[in-house]
Amino acid sequence: MLMKSEQKRILRFALPKGSLQEATIEKMAKAGYNIQVSSRSYIPYVDDDELEIRLIRAQEISRYVENGHMDCGITGYDWIKENNSKVHEVGEFLFSKATRQPARWVLAVPEDSPIKSVKDLEGKRIATEVVNLTHRYLKQHQVKAEVEFSWGATEFKAHELVDAIVELTETGSSLRANKLRIVETLLVSTPRLIANDQAWQDKWKREKIETLAMLLKGALEAEAKVGLKMNIQEKNLANLLQSLPALRNPTVSNLSLAGWVAVETIIDEHIVRELIPQLKAAGAEGIIEYPLNKVVY
């Protein structure tokens, strides 16, 4: 039995339940944390005895972290601002459920609406889930308008029930499909790893949180990159590096065959299809492309 001074340390970690849940758990797996969720429980299994994970709505996570019920959590920057939560932001991450673009809260109106700017909202009615953000935005522009909370189907309301909406979008395609026009962007939001002040001041918890951030960032960095290995005659190496800037800082090592070297580097995946033919033309042989789990700078 553990003595009181030897009790196991635990970090209470909140992850978003709902639309971002699957993407978040996938990224955590790439960071090295295997999380399994049961449909009957809000307490997932994680293969780290020092972590206790809870699934909580992203809208609420910053409040539970701020008040100390959770030590840290991942939630959107938008909900930190909507709740006006005083928390420590450890890291910013981009793992949208649809694209690698950040999400935006935008003011939108029907395509044929006379509203062209926020100033045209004077005396109008707006529906949104981010009531506080919208109120602050209107106040910033010295506009008085009625803001009502929307439980859903917000895009439909813009045509029949309200004059405008403030809605979350990544690409704008859903708004266009509903014949809505974006007027202005209120806020750009990305997922953030946050911690409360008490947890951040605790040496053990802070180190644990910083390790989470490092591994998660490394996993996300690796998603858009691949590793390349190849062999080339040493006499052609300088020309290869000069003509291909993407390889300006590779690892170069001698092979057992005199006059040949092995070159290894990490590059953005989207340029590989253009790069490999150039490598081949420059004299590279045995070119191998491989996926990466983490890239930690």
Image (tube, rainbow, N blue to C red):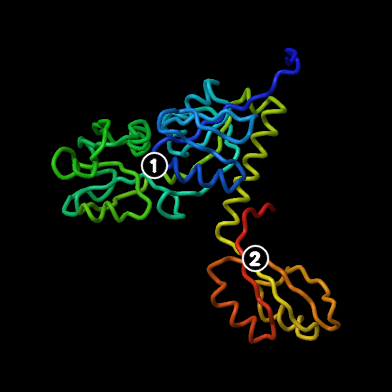
Foreground pick, 180 / 280: 280
Can you say whether 178 is above or below 16 in the image?
below
Kind of element beneath mark 1 = loop
Where on the picture, by quarter, is residue 257? bottom right
Q: Is residue 122 above or below residue 26?
A: above
- Out of 233 and 181, give the one closest to the viewer: 233
Q: Which mark is residue 19?
A: 1
Q: Residue at x 23, y 52 (%)?
A: 180
The structure residue drawn at horizontal position 58% and vertical position 32%, both measured from the top left corner, is 88
Position of 265 with respect to 156 (left or right) is right
Residue at 76% from the left image edge and 81% from the top image edge? 237
Residue 93: % across, % down: 54, 46
> In front: 71, or 30?
30
Per the image, the residue denoted by label 2 is 227
Q: What whole-number distance in Å separates the C-alpha atoms at marks 2 and 1?
A: 31 Å
Residue flagged by tag 1: what amino acid is it? Ser
Q: Earlier in the sequence, mark 2 or mark 1?
A: 1
Q: Position of residue 92 (x, y in %)?
A: 55, 44
The secondary element bearing badge 2 is classed as: strand
What amino acid is at disc 2?
Gly
Neighbours of disc 1 within 10 Å: few (<14), some (14-19), many (20+): few
